[in-house]
Image (tube, rainbow, N blue to C red):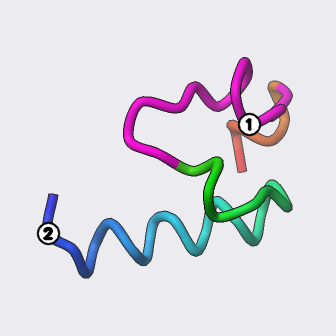
Amino acid sequence: MSQDVESKVKAIIIDKLGVDESEVVADANFTNDLGADSLDTVE
C-alpha cells in the first residue's frame, strides 16, 4: 500500500474509532485490537 493511501486510511481509523495513532498498525484487528463494534465496522 502506498504511504499516501496508508496515512489517509490511518487518519480515518483514528478519527472514527478515537484510538491512538500507535495502535493503528497493519496487523491490527478492528474488533480485538481497536475496540470497534459491529456498527463501527459498517461505517
Residue that mark 1 sits on: 34
Across and down, in percent, residue 2 comes to 14, 69
Q: Is residue 37 left or right of residue 24?
A: right
Please give the count of numbered marks on the rendered protein.
2
Compared with 15, 18 (above or below) is above
Across and down, in percent, residue 1 comes to 15, 57
Front-lying residue, 33 or 41 = 33
Question: Outermost residue toward the top?
Answer: 32
Question: Circle 2: is it few (<14), some (14-19), or many (20+) Cα within 10 Å?
Answer: few
Q: Which residues, given as a range, are shown in magenta?
A: 25-37
Residue depicted at x 41% and y 30%: 27
Question: Outermost residue toward the left?
Answer: 2
Residue depicted at x 64% and y 31%: 30
Magenta stretch contains residue 23: no
Front-lying residue, 30 or 26 = 26
Residue depicted at x 74% and y 36%: 34
Q: Amino acid at mark 1?
A: Leu
Front-lying residue, 27 or 15 = 27
Question: Circle 1: is it few (<14), some (14-19), or many (20+) Cα within 10 Å?
Answer: some
Compared with 31, 17 (above or below) is below
Question: Which type of secondary structure does the marked residue at label 2 adopt?
Answer: loop
Which of the 4 image quadrants contains residue 12? bottom right
Residue that mark 2 sits on: 2
Across and down, in percent, residue 28 comes to 53, 32
- How far apart, in angstroms, are the residues tagged by discs 2 and 1? 22 Å
Residue depicted at x 85% and y 61%: 18
Q: Amino acid at mark 2?
A: Ser
